[in-house]
Image: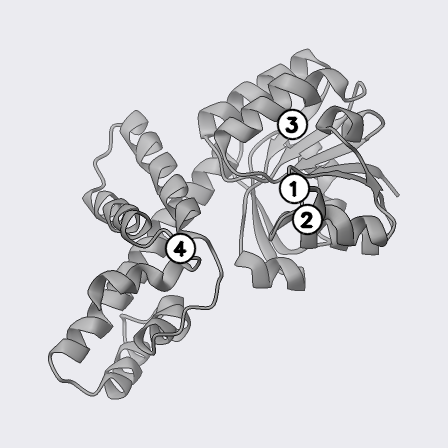
Amino acid sequence: MSNIAFIGTGTMGGPLAGHLMAAGHTLSVHARTPSRAQGLVERGARWAATAAEAVRDAEVVFTMVGGPRDVEGLYFGEILDAAPHGALLIDMTTSSPRLAQRLHEAAATHGHQALDAPVTGGPQGAQAGALIVMVGGEADALQRARPLLDTFSRTVLHYGPAGNGQRAKLVNQCVAMQNMISAIEGLFFARRAGLDTDQMLQMLQAGLTDSKSLHGLAPLALRGEFPPNFHPVHVVKDLTLALEEADALGIDLPGLRNAHARWTQLVERFPEAKAVHEVARLYL
């Protein structure tokens, strides 16, 4: 069993930390909002007032925080210096590929190993322990991490060097969010045209147009049901990162730019939105 530090115990991180505890590992936890770690502390995790305190005796450090600024501040401000020599640092935040590469290099300088390991599957996948993990970093570090990742995932994919886990996640977000836009636009187009939307949905689901969006969130949007899931602010963050990486690679992705503009518009017009499919509000 491992001595683990888990930094960031929110909607996604909290369940993952819980799976690690259920597997018998010892956890120290820290979160920007202490109440988000309370359930883990009640189950036996040790609360740490700072990230540095959390990682001081950790063999493995997991982080799952808001974005690149949080990652950079945590690692370069506290974790790299405070973690014991030889610690394995696993950042699961959807973040910048170039930051992941910097972190990997800095970790090696400090005598640590590092992986970028963002996930897909959402809060339901986190609760069920059924996430897909996209990993960038060295194979021996992944081999060391795999038994831990297996406690909350159904698939672990290695994409090669540091930063490539983040690149894989950004590709996922590029495709997923454009799928969402296309499903919602098609269904609301059908409604405005006076078509039977149930019949339309069945047709779309049966052909080449099928997608998970058409089976899940888009029909909910059509019914005006918006239970909280993935916050639109995070969609904007992820698509911004994807656009930055596309620009760095010299590839123009106009569909991605359109999707980014739509969710940006949603956040500006409906700041109270808490679900990714609330982008449909722009079509009501």
The numbered mark at residue 36 is 2
* Residue labelled with disc 4: 272
Helix, strand, or loop for circle 3? strand
Check the image and name the residue furthest to the top: 109
Rendered image quadrant of residue 256: top left
Left or right, 280 with reference to 25: left
Q: Nearer the viewer, mark 3 or mark 1?
A: 1
Rendered image quadrant of residue 222: bottom left
Helix, strand, or loop for circle 2? helix
Label 4, label 2: how far apart the Cα atoms are: 21 Å
Residue type highlighted by circle 1: Thr
Label 3, label 1: how far apart the Cα atoms are: 25 Å
* Residue labelled with disc 3: 114
Q: Are marks 4 and 3 in contact (CB under 8 Å)?
A: no
Q: Nearer the viewer, mark 4 or mark 3?
A: 4
* Residue labelled with disc 1: 33
Label 4, label 1: how far apart the Cα atoms are: 20 Å
